[in-house]
């Protein structure tokens, strides 16, 4: 069993202290040792950064088109995921450039560990010395570790918010009136330092994304059930058992459903980078080019591991919290119902013709979104361990049970009065 340990351990305030004090622009290295700021000061800065990040997150004037805010794609009412069922969203200065990946939820990212090629889990019941392989990092391919570095991606991407560079972002933020807040947080001199301003803007997004009430409230029915304050319906309880059972769904192997040893609530991900060989999604315009493949950890969005063929096709396991608020699933948004998403797991091997296209001779073109030389990267853990014609690990009714259980992971549960 694996759980992330960033930020969660020790409570978020201590962590905030670290995050904020280390990188206040303008502070010379060493002048503010970690934890060197008085607690009240740290709290004030964190609150102001959160408020600034929250305001900028919903502000479309920070984009080249003037039409796209972070929340256009990451809607707070939808677990900070997309509101529509499109596999990819439109962006760019003219709002006419399609993205290449589905928009992930931003909830429960606080526990994502930094990317590593070798993850050893101290919480693993069986053996601490097992190398779980590439794990963690933000975005579907884990290519950045910090929220601040991540925020720079959409702000500058020519198919997202479309700014031509950091100066354009800073100019827009000042034009939108954030100068006073930035000055209050970082000190009077910050307005004379464009680099510090840019870093300060990015930091505000990162700190906002660590706001527990907004991003990781643990307020689902499942959390209430874990706390003994709610009862699962018979169908939800069956679904949970099937989700956990290694001989049935085996979902919890990767989407961890139990508390960590220190009592941390389950995140429903172990953050592993895994290839599950989804069908190619021809609704993504980039896929019209038959030579284009989104290979996740080995590229092309991510470039540092492009010479590592064993990483081609791997994408980070997402948390399943709030997954029922989504209308498109997986990194390429190929499925539009939870039933299909779960059915794919149990029938990828037993009935591949249900998902993959056919060759002219009628044979099924399995794994059609991953070039054949990477086939050995494809995960074969249960329920992917079955063979053509075997009975699937879950019946259609059992898939419905798992889906009913997944719906208990949506935050904002109100017990019936
Ligand atoms: C046009 C749609 C769009 C906009 C606008 C957008 N994002 Fe995203 N966001 C995405 C997509 C798509 C991904 C996945 C990118 C990838 O895997 O390469 C993503 C990924 C992320 C992630 C990483 C999630 C994870 O699971 O690791 C964070 C954090 C994030 N966005 C924050 C932001 C912030 C902050 C803004 C505004 C500054 C923003 N996004 C604006 C589409 C968008
Ligand atoms: C071997 C690890 C592993 C197992 C076992 C596993 N998953 Fe996943 N899951 C992943 C990975 C990796 C992804 C993302 C893959 C991608 O998009 O390319 C994912 C994505 C998903 C998504 C899409 C979430 C989103 O935000 O789009 C759903 C739903 C899901 N899994 C449900 C399940 C269920 C239900 C089971 C059990 C039947 C299960 N998973 C078993 C690793 C796993």
Image: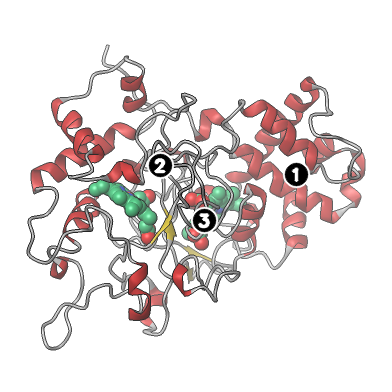
Depth check: give the residue in front, 186 or 66: 186
In the rendering, at what x and y percent does residue 104 appear?
Answer: 44, 52
Q: Which mark is residue 139?
A: 3
Measure the alpha-carbon separation of dots 3 and 1. Answer: 30 Å
Q: Specify which label sits upstream in the sequence, 3 or 1.
A: 3
Quadrant (top left/top right/bottom left/bottom right) for the C terminus: top left
Residue in the picture at 12% in, 88% down? 361
Earlier-in-chain disc, 2 versus 1: 2
Residue 236, position in %: x, y?
Answer: 20, 31
User: Mark 2 — residue?
Assistant: 78
Label count reads 3
Q: Quadrant of residue 381?
A: bottom left
Q: CA distance from mark 3 to mark 2?
A: 18 Å
Answer few, some or many: residues within 10 Å of disc 1's Cα (few below 14, many 20 plus, some between 14 and 19).
few
State the image coordinates of residue 142 (x, y, percent, origin top left): 53, 57
Q: Of circles 3 and 2, which is in front?
A: 3
Q: Quadrant of residue 226?
A: top left
Residue situated in front as seen by the camera: 158 or 3: 3
Q: Is mark 2 within 8 Å of ligand 2?
A: no
Q: Secondary structure at mark 1?
A: loop
């Amino acid at each position: 069993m694996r759980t992330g340990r960033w930020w969660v351990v020790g409570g978020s305030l201590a962590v905030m202290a670290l995050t904020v004090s280390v990188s206040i622009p303008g502070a010379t290295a060493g002048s503010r040792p970690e934890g060197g700021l008085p607690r009240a000061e740290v709290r004030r800065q964190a609150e102001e950064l959160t408020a600034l990040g929250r305001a900028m997150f919903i502000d479309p004037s920070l984009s080249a088109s003037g039409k796209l805010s972070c929340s256009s794609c990451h809607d707070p009412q939808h677990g900070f995921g997309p509101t529509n069922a499109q596999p990819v969203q439109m962006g760019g200065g003219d709002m006419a450039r399609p993205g290449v990946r589905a928009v992930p939820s931003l909830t429960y990212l606080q526990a994502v560990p930094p990317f590593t090629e070798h993850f050893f889990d101290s919480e693993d019941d069986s053996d601490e010395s097992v190398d779980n392989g590439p794990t963690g990092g933000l975005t579907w391919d884990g290519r950045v570790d910090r929220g601040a570095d991540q925020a720079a991606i959409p702000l500058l991407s020519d198919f997202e918010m479309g700014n031509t560079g950091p100066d354009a972002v800073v100019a827009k933020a000042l034009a939108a009136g954030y100068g006073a807040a930035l000055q209050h947080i970082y000190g009077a001199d910050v307005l004379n330092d464009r680099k510090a301003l840019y870093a300060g803007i990015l930091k505000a997004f990162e700190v906002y994304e660590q706001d527990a009430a907004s991003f990781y409230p643990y307020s689902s029915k499942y959390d209430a059930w874990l706390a003994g304050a709610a009862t699962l319906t018979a169908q939800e309880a069956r679904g949970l058992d099937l989700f956990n059972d290694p001989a049935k769904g085996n979902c919890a192997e990767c989407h961890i459903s139990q508390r960590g040893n220190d009592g941390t609530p389950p995140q429903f991900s172990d953050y592993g980078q895994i290839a599950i060989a989804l069908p190619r999604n021809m609704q993504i315009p980039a896929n019209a080019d038959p030579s284009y493949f989104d290979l996740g950890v080995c590229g092309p969005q991510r470039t540092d591991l492009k010479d590592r063929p064993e990483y081609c096709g791997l994408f980070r396991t997402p948390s399943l919290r709030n997954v029922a608020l989504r209308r498109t699933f997986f990194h390429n948004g190929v499925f539009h119902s939870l039933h299909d998403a779960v059915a794919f797991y149990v029938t990828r091997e037993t009935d591949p013709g249900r998902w993959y296209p056919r060759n002219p001779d009628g044979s099924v073109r399995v794994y059609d979104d991953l070039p054949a030389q990477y086939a050995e990267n494809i995960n074969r853990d249960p329920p992917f361990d079955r063979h053509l014609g075997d009975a699937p690990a879950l019946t259609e009714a059992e898939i419905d049970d798992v889906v009913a259980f997944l719906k208990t992971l949506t935050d904002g549960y109100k017990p019936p009065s």
